[in-house]
Image: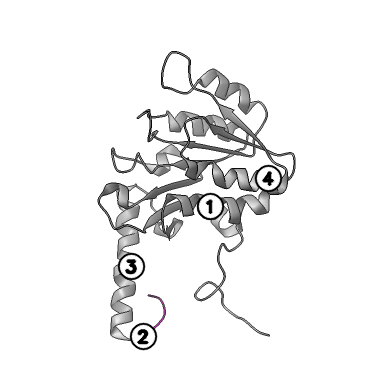
Amino acid sequence: IHRGIHELAEEATALYEGARRRIADFIQVRDADELIFTRNTTESINLVANAWGRKFLKAGDHILLTEMEHHSNLIPWYMLAAEKGIKIDFVSLDENSSKLDMDRFHALLQKEPKLVAFTHASNVLGTVNPVQEMTEQAHQINAVVLIDGAQSVPHFPVNIEQIGADFYAFSAHKMCGPTGVGILYGKRPFLEKMDPFLGGGDMIKKVTF
C-alpha cells in the first residue's frame, strides 16, 4: 500500500483506504485521516504514551486514571510515569455499586491533570461510563482525554465526535474482525504535533546522510 504504481499496489491501497473510510463512518468521524491503524488497543495507547506523552508531559505532572482500567490503559502510563517523574491518581469505585465515584472524579480534576484516561465500558464489570460528561469536565481544566473503547465499539453505537475525546482506541478482534488490527482515533491538531512513533519507510519525505 502507498508504495508502488503497479496495478496490485494501487488496488491494495484503494482497499486499505476504503477500509479506513468505512471505519470512520462506523464511529461517525468526518475526517478519516484522523484514524491510525495499529495492531490492537494496547499498541494504540502505547502510541499515545510515547508519541504524545513523552513529548508533552513532564516531571510533576498528573495523570488521572480509574480503578477499572484494563492493563492496556495502565502499564503504558506506569512506564512513562517512572521514566519522567509523573504522578498518577485513580478514580475509585463507588462503594455501593460497580460505577465510578464521580465525586472522587470531580475532586481529582482539581489537581489539574494533564491527561485523563478511562475506559468507555469495563471488560470486568460491564459498567458503561458517562464518557461524554467526563470528557467535557476534563476539557474544562484543559486536560487531554484518552478513552479505551475496546469493549464499547463492538457492543453499541459510538459517536466519537459527539463524545469529544482527543484520543479513542479499539480493536477489530473484539467485533469478529481480523486479529492484529487496532484503531486509534486522534484529533488532527494533536496528531500533527506528536513526534513519530516509529521511524522507517513511508513516514518521512527526505533522508540524507
Query: The magenta stretch spans which residues?
Result: 1-5
Q: Residue at x 62, y 26 (%)?
A: 108
Of callouts 1 and 3, the N-terminal one: 3
Of callouts 2 and 3, the N-terminal one: 2
| Dot 3 alpha-carbon crowd within 10 angstroms: few under 14, some 14 to 19, many 20 or more | some
Q: Assign the magenta stretch its main secondary structure.
A: loop
Separation of marks 4 and 2 at Cα, in angstroms: 46 Å
Separation of marks 4 and 3 at Cα, in angstroms: 37 Å
Looking at the image, residue 162 lies above or below residue 177: above
Indicate left or right for 176 with 69 as reference. left
Comparing 50 with 34, the one in front is 50
For the residue marked with disc 4, what is the amino acid?
Ala
Of callouts 1 and 2, the N-terminal one: 2
In the picture, the disc for residue 121 is none
Using the rendered view, name the quadrant where residue 9 is placed.
Answer: bottom left
Of callouts 4 and 2, the N-terminal one: 2
The residue at which mark 4 appears reads as 82
Looking at the image, residue 203 lies above or below residue 177: below
Comparing 79 with 16, the one in front is 79
In the picture, the disc for residue 16 is 3
Q: Are marks 2 and 3 in contact (CB under 8 Å)?
A: no
| Dot 2 alpha-carbon crowd within 10 angstroms: few under 14, some 14 to 19, many 20 or more | few
Looking at the image, residue 135 lies above or below residue 15: above
Separation of marks 1 and 2 at Cα, in angstroms: 33 Å
Q: Residue 87: in sight, yes or no?
A: yes
Q: Are marks 4 and 2 in contact (CB under 8 Å)?
A: no
Separation of marks 4 and 1 at Cα, in angstroms: 15 Å
The residue at which mark 2 appears reads as 5
The residue at which mark 1 appears reads as 46
Please identify, in this view, whether the residue under mark 4 or under mark 1 is nearer the observer: 4
Q: Residue at x 39, y 83 (%)?
A: 4
